[in-house]
Image (cartoon, rainbow, N blue to C red):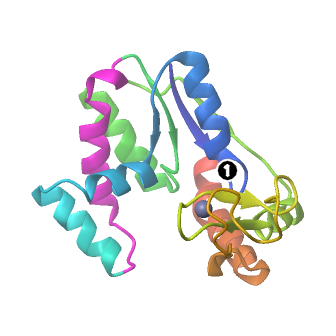
């Protein structure tokens, strides 16, 4: 089973991807995780990815696709995967199709998580995380026991700059512009 999850930031793609991956006993392939993982590799490709991330730049498609090609060829992905975070644009989807064709695979299904903008703004602006252990909280749905402190290590929680409401709206606009042609 090879599934791609599409949806705006804050739609819950990561959460649903983990559940689907469990259900179908296939790996959850997220480009964010691959990138975090690969920068630890002392390889040429790991170093290239790291140089973009260190500069706070987007890793170019061509490099992400190269990493996906490696990831999808690994043994645990032989019977399928649940992909989230990629593709986001039509050219990325076409490139992914090409890679899959080369390794004799194809996508079985695409799930688009549709969530109203207001709800996304509400959800993401309630998101906070711990700078020490990386745990994330939703201040509405699953707040920490003590106000704005991590349950695990009591560090003060922080909210990401890009989770401010005006930035969220901007991220949603980017999503619509980039991904709607893909959804269509
Ligand atoms: Zn913590």
Residue beneath the point at 50% across and 56% down: 89
Q: Which secondary structure class fits the magenta region best?
A: helix
Q: Does residue 155 lie above or below 85 as drawn? A: below
In the image: residue 112, left or right of residue 32: right
Q: Position of residue 84 (x, y in %)?
A: 53, 44
Residue 163's image quarter?
Answer: bottom right
Check if residue 73 falls in the magenta segment: yes
Q: Quadrant of ligand 1?
A: bottom right
From the image, tell me which residue sits under label 1. 7
Residue 160's image quarter?
Answer: bottom right
Q: Does residue 60 lie above or below 23 as drawn? A: below
Name the residue nearer the viewer: 41 or 6: 41
Q: How many marks?
A: 1
In the image: residue 59, left or right of residue 156: left
Check if residue 100 falls in the magenta segment: no
Residue beneath the point at 56% across and 71% down: 131
Q: Tell me which segment is drawn in magenta.
A: 56-78
Q: Position of residue 129 (x, y in %)?
A: 64, 66
Name the residue nearer the viewer: 177 or 136: 136
């Amino acid at each position: 089973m090879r599934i791609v999850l599409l949806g705006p930031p804050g739609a819950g793609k990561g959460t649903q991807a983990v559940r689907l991956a469990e259900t179908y006993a296939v790996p959850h392939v997220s480009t964010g995780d691959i990138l975090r993982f690969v920068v630890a590799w002392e390889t040429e490709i790991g170093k290239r990815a790291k140089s973009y991330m260190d500069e706070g730049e987007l890793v170019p498609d061509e490099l992400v696709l190269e990493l996906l090609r490696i990831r999808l060829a690994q043994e645990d992905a032989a019977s399928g995967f649940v992909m989230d975070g990629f593709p986001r644009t039509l050219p990325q989807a076409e490139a992914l199709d090409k890679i899959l064709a080369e390794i004799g695979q194809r996508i079985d299904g695409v799930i688009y998580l549709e969530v109203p903008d207001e709800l996304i703004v509400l959800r993401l602006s309630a998101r906070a995380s711990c700078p020490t252990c990386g745990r994330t909280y939703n201040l509405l749905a699953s707040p920490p026991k003590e106000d704005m402190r991590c349950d695990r290590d009591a560090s003060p929680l922080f909210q990401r700059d890009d989770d401010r409401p005006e930035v969220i709206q901007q991220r949603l606009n980017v999503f619509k512009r980039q991904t709607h042609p893909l959804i269509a």
